[in-house]
Amino acid sequence: AKSYNITLLPGDGIGPEVISVAKNVLNLAASTQGIEFKFNEMPMGGAALDLTGVPLPEETLTAAKQSDAVLLGAIGGYKWDKNEKHLKPETGLLQLREGLKVFANLRPATVLPQLVDASTLKKEVAEGVDLMVVRELTGGIYFGKPRGFGTDENGEEIGFNTEVYAAYEIDRIARIAFETARKRSGKLCSVDKANVLEASMLWRKRVIAISEEYPDVELSHMYVDNAAMQLVRNPKQFDTIVTNNIFGDILSDEASMITGSIGMLPSASLGASGPGLFEPIHGSAPDIAGQDKANPLATILSAAMLLKYGLGEVKAAERIELAVLDTLNRGFRTGDIYSPGNILVGCKEMGEQVLKSLDTKVPAS
Ligand code: NAD
Ligand code: IPM
Ligand code: MN
């Protein structure tokens, strides 16, 4: 059997709950495809802080780098919110993305017919939405220097960050976005703030330059404030969106709500080479952690993205996607996507039902 090494980073809050479910789904999906997984579970985020004093221990990064793919739950929580910057769980996640050099973050938002009722948007607005946010992940204001705390000329305390992009960083994410758009409907919308920010002016210039290589893709540009508005006014106008790190963070949470819940949205973070990082776009949800209420589907769908984008195991990935659809067809819903007439279940039961669908309803080949 083909064997892959997967690093599991459960993290904090609902992270361990959704990872435990996704692990079982991966195992069952693999077994019928002649694939075998070796899982290596490592500490990350707040869990790592408590255990080792740092949010991304060296052993965790090394294990991640040496594996075939990395599946992360979520990190963060009240307990560590007041920590200094370098001792925050979130800093560990940024170090992981930087360490794995995964500059391209694919965040698909698809309104499944089964969940149209779960969207807060009107049926006719939400129905049929199928878009992909391509978020730059290792640059921009998250990593830009100078950054820090200090005092201004009046002695006033200040905090500062820098939005900075080099041409090569824009070029490589633009190429990923054009390739993505080409495989989808051939429409790419680049979202920036080029009316105000120099980093965005360069962004737009480089995206236009790279578009010469993709004459078959229809490119448009939109300011981010308008894009935030257009996403809820008429989301079907979008196919592929490419944007910087912080705008992508915000717009993908917004896009998730069109689909019904942030608990549904998976993501894939890819670099030029080496293992990809796969994680739901949601956080550790401390408000529902430990209560078996989390929707595990975003993580299960991230596991499907791991199979497809990380390992090229497209068949196994499709089986997981079909199992999720079958589970929804059979009426099972966690609280975040519940609508009357369906069956309300917790995280574990949702996982069991996906396993059942995978086992009995989805053909193995
Ligand atoms: P969040 O995504 O954790 O939660 C926002 C809201 O969505 C909460 O009401 C939560 O209950 C709900 N929610 C999220 N995931 C859900 C799921 N799978 N099923 C059902 N409901 C779900 O965002 P937040 O509250 O702003 O952040 C909480 C912590 O998570 C913070 O420490 C933050 O830094 C961290 N965070 C981590 C990641 C990550 O690990 N990639 C992403 C975002 C936020
Ligand atoms: C995400 C999160 C992270 C981000 C945080 C936790 C660092 O919000 O994965 O979307 O801002 O990228
Ligand atoms: Mn986010």
Image: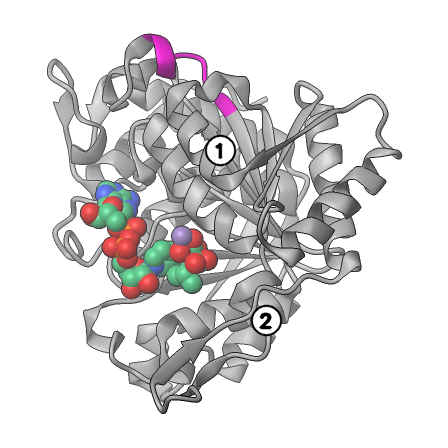
Lower position in the chain sequence, tag 2 or tag 1: 2
Q: Which residue lies furthest to the right in this view?
A: 213
- Whether residue 80 sits left or right of residue 287 in the image: it is right
Q: In which quarter of the image is the C terminus?
A: top right
Q: Can residue 16 be seen in this view?
A: no
Identity of the residue furthest to the front in this view:
154
Residue 311 occupies quadrant? top right
Residue for point 44% across, 89% down: 153
Which residue lies under the disc numbered 1? 227
Check the image and report above or below for 208 versus 158: above
Q: Is mark 1 on a helix, strand or loop?
A: helix
Q: Is residue 31 found left or right of 172 in the rendered image?
A: left
Percent position of residue 331, x then y = 22, 18
In front: 350, or 144? 144
The residue carrying mark 2 is: 144
Marks 2 and 1 sit apart, C-alpha to C-alpha, by 24 Å
Q: What residue type is labelled 1?
A: Ala
Q: In percent of the image, x 30 and y 27: which residue is there? A: 260
In magenta, the rendered stretch is 124-130
Residues packed near mark 1 inside 10 Å, few (<14), some (14 to 19) or many (20 plus)? many
In this view, the residue farthest toward the top is 124
Give the residue type at disc 2.
Gly
Question: What colour scheme has been applied to the protein in the rendered image?
Answer: one colour
Asked if the stretch drawn in magenta spans residue 48, the answer is: no
Residue 162 lies in what quarter of the image?
bottom right
Q: Where is residue 51 in the image (x, y as percent from the top left)?
A: 32, 84
Disc 2, SS: loop
Q: Within 10 Å of the Cα at label 2, are there few (<14), some (14-19), or many (20+) other Cα atoms?
A: some
Establish if 285 lies above or below 45: above
